[in-house]
Amino acid sequence: MKITAVETFPLSFPLKEPASDATGIWHTWNTLLIKITAENGMFGIGEVGPLHGGGLRVYQALVESKLKELLIGEDVFQREYLFNKLIGIGTSSYAFGQQGAIVSAVGGIDIALWDLVGKILNTPVYNLLGGLYHKKIPAYASGFFGKNGSVLNQQQCVEEATFYKDLGFKGVKMKIGFNREFDLQNIEAVRKTLGKDFLIMVDANQGLTLHEAKMISRRLEEYDIYFVEEPLSIFDIEGMAELSKNVNFAIAAGENYYSAADFRTLFEKRAIQIAQPDIIHAGGFTGMHKIACLAKIYNVPLAPHIHATVGVAASIQLLAAASNTLMAEYIMTGGSYELRKELFGDSYQVKDGFIEVSDLPGLGVELNEKAIQKYLK
Ligand SMILES: [Mg+2]
C-alpha cells in the first residue's frame, strides 16, 4: 500500500495566562500534526513536539523539505525500514544527525504510519505491538506550572493537588528546583493535604547540581517522595548514578533522551530506576518500542513523559501493550489539554486514577477539522 501524501499542520494554542517551569515561560502551546495518506484514501495522524512558544517551523521544514520526499511512493507497512531511511541510514538525511529534532520529526511520521496501518488492518495499534497487556493505565497528575511567570506558592500547590485528588488521581508530580526551602515547604503542605497514601513525585527539570540534590534528598525522603525526575543535567549520567546509590527514592528521566542507545547508557550505569521516554520526542512507536523492550531487560518500569495531543493517544497505545508499564503522566494545564479537547474531545478522562485504553482502529482518534483550521499557524 503506497504512501501518496504527507501533510503538516502547525498548531498554536494561545494560553489565557502564560505558564512556566524551570525551562522557561510560554504564552502559546505549539505542536505539529502530520497526516499521511495511502493510495486507498485512508490516512494516519502523528504528532511532533511539544514546543513551548515557538520553533514550529523547524519540525515542519524537516518534514516538508526533506523527509516527505523519502516517503512518497513507499509502502506504509514498512515502518522499520522507513524509520531507518528517514534518520539517514543509507540516505542523505544522515546530515541532520541521528539525535534531537530529526528523531522527533521522524517519530511524528512514524506515529502517523502506525495509526494508518492500524486503520487499514482495522485493529488498535496495541495489537501491532504485541497485543493488549493492560486494559487500563494508572495515571498520575502532572502540571504545577508557574502562572504569569511566578512559581506556585503553598496555597496554589495545595489547591492544584486537591483538584487532582477530587478527580480521582492517586498521585501528583510537583515542580522543584527553584529555592530549596520554598520547594520543601510546598511539598510539605501538599503531603499534609493529600495524606500518607498518596503518591507524590517531584520534577527538577535538570535544575540541581549533584551537591544540591544530595542536600535536599534527606528532606525529600521525609516526605516519602516516590521519584525525583531529572534532578541533574541530562548529561550528568554519572551524577545520577551516584545519586541513585545514595537515596531512598527512584531517579526518573527520559523526556530529553532520543534513542534506545541513550537509555542503554542510563540502564547500564544504573542512573535511573524509572524510564520516561516521550513518544513524540523519541522516534514514535518504532523508537519507543525498542526503548520499552530494553527497559524491560534491565528491569526498569516505564512512566513516559506525556505532554501532547495526539501523542496522548499514541502513548496510551504503547503503554497498553508494554509489560513494564508503571503509569502515564497526565497534564491538564499549560495548553496541551485544552487543545486536545478541541481536536478530539475529552476522550482520555481519568477515572479512579486510571485511563481506559481505546479499542478503536489505529490510535482511536478522529480529529475535528474545524479545530485544526482554528489553530493553524
Ligand atoms: Mg519533566
Image (spheres, grey):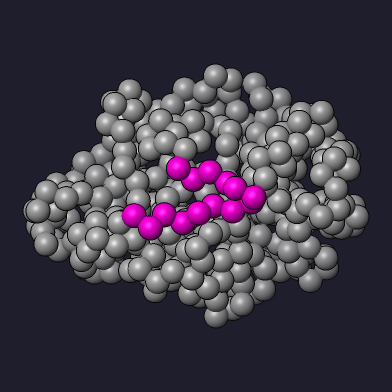
Q: Is residue 208 left or right of residue 296?
A: right
Residue at image location 38% in from the left, 62% down from the top: 285
Between 282 and 319, the one nearer to me in the picture:
319
Q: Is residue 267 above or below residue 275?
A: below
Q: Quadrant of the N terminus?
A: bottom left
Q: Is residue 66 above or below residue 323?
A: above
- Where residue 214 appears, as percent x and y from the top left, is 84, 57
Between 285 and 95, the one nearer to me in the picture:
285
Q: Quadrant of the C terminus?
A: top left
- Where residue 234 appears, as percent x and y from the top left, is 61, 56
Q: Is residue 25 above or below residue 222?
A: above
Between 231 and 110, the one nearer to me in the picture:
110
Number of callouts:
0
Residue at image location 16% in from the left, 50% down from the top: 42
Q: Is residue 232 left or right of residue 8?
A: right
- Where residue 131 appears, as percent x and y from the top left, is 40, 71
Judge whether residue 61 can be spotted in this image. Answer: no
Residue at image location 39% in from the left, 74% down from the top: 130
Q: Is residue 210 left or right of residue 10?
A: right
Residue 377 in magenta stretch? no
- Where residue 46 appears, as percent x and y from the top left, is 32, 48
Residue numbers of the magenta segment: 347-360
Between 329 and 133, the one nearer to me in the picture:
133
Magenta: main secondary structure equals: loop
Judge whether residue 13 can be spotted in this image. Answer: yes
- Residue extending furthest toward the bottom: 297
Residue 358 in magenta stretch? yes
Residue at image location 53% in from the left, 43% down from the top: 349
